[in-house]
Image (spheres, rainbow, N blue to C red):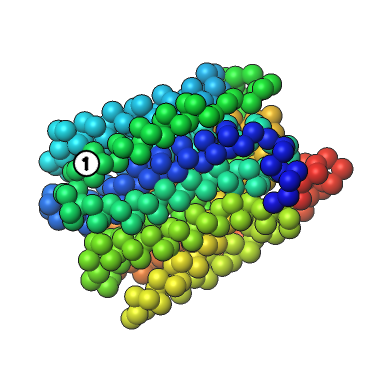
Amino acid sequence: MNNNFWKAGHIPTLFAAFLYFDLSFMVWYLLGPLAVQIAADLQLTTEQRGLMVATPILAGAVLRLLMGVLADRLSPKTAGIIGQVIVIAALLAAWQLGIHSYAQALGLGVCLGMAGASFAVALPLASQWYPAEHQGKALGIAGAGNSGTVLAALAAPLLAAAFGWTNVFGLALIPLVLTLAIFSLLARNAPGRSPAKSVADYLKALKDRDSWWFMFFYSVTFGGFIGLASALPGYFHDQYGLSPVTAGYYTAACVFGGSLMRPLGGALADRFGGIRTLSGMYALAAICIGAVGFHLASSMAALALFVSAMLGLGAGNGAVFQLVPQRFAKEIGVMTGLVGMAGGIGGFLLAAGLGAIKQGTGDYQLGLWLFAVLGVVAWFGLQSVKRRWRTTWGSVTLTAARV
């Protein structure tokens, strides 16, 4: 990144958006690395465990739309503070009152969905400060808050083994409160923000076919990332008999790769074009996930393929959001909510679907292959629109960014 990027926007806000997103993702994902221990104590089936870890993803998907409306009408900073307070209150209640049933675990998952809705705050907050040619890098950095999943995957199983999984909710409050204070001090709303969008604006956006393409593309990249991140602790435990802590280490390696590649994916899209970058990432992810489905005897081989797939999905996340602001510059708040919601729904379907397929067939193979096929479909979908995009809104006569 050159000096022009660092001078183009507001660095304290970019850092605050990243930190807020990072810690929000950590708690949004918290039930995933704790799933094996919670399921053992609450005597959950594989399908119930899958639905438990998928519930925060679905709730986050729906709440992203609400948070997007709040960010439009109030401001991204104000919406972020409101969301963070709600998450802190939910964790405090879970810590003090405990989780004693499957229904209560699902209820906590719904509340943690507000943390997943941070997507609709962090990305517009950063995006509105930066010009078109730097959108990929700016949104890649803000979106690298996906790395919060690494913190949860590494720390949560260890802390649960040492102090009990209920106390992990209390320990998570410490960094969350600190982050709320930092975010409140550093984040600034961009000057000259677009007027608040109405419900009609959302309905209007849904009438544009490109909206649906972006929602589909992100449901595969981000949905694949967060869905696999939530399901992998259980997958490694079931498939290879790994302990919750070791399964957490394996999962952390996977999500670290995906998180690292999000800003790099945005930078690659700025350099080579979002369509070209995204096409390569879909191909990589589909090949690797398809290969994992062949009953690999070695857990290390499966780990290597999952890491490679997550690298592709993470970079794909950055590439999608290099393209979205080019196509919908004036509707970025609306589109962040819609596209983010679609990504969350994709993650819910993948995490819950893998659990249901494992429960029904005794194997994860069919679920993995179905997701790989979806990646292939997304690749062909991208090829079908690239010519139109590059000759209309992505034309060099209309934008300085590479599409």
Q: Is residue 344 above or below residue 201?
A: below
Q: Is residue 375 visible?
A: no
Q: Is residue 242 visible?
A: yes
Query: Residue 254: percent from the left, percent from the top?
Result: 43, 62
Q: Residues within 10 Å of mark 1 (few under 14, many from 20)?
A: many
Quarter of the image where one finds residue 93: top left
Determine the residue positioned at 38% across, 60% down: 252
Q: Is residue 75 above or below residue 98?
A: above
Determine the residue positioned at 24% across, 32% down: 92
Query: Residue 172: percent from the left, percent from the top?
Result: 30, 41
Determine whether, in the image, residue 182 is placed left or right of residue 32.
Answer: right
Quarter of the image where one finds residue 356: bottom left
Determine whether, in the image, residue 176 is placed left or right of residue 21.
Answer: left
Query: Residue 111: percent from the left, percent from the top?
Result: 31, 33
Residue placed most toward the observer, 314 or 385: 314
Q: Which residue is mark 1?
A: 105
Q: Is residue 161 above or below residue 168?
A: below
Query: Residue 249: percent from the left, percent from the top?
Result: 33, 63
Element on which disc 1 rests: helix
Determine whether, in the image, residue 244 is placed left or right of residue 20.
Answer: left
Determine the residue positioned at 35% across, 65% down: 250
Residue furthest right in the image: 397
Name the amino acid type tagged 1. Ala
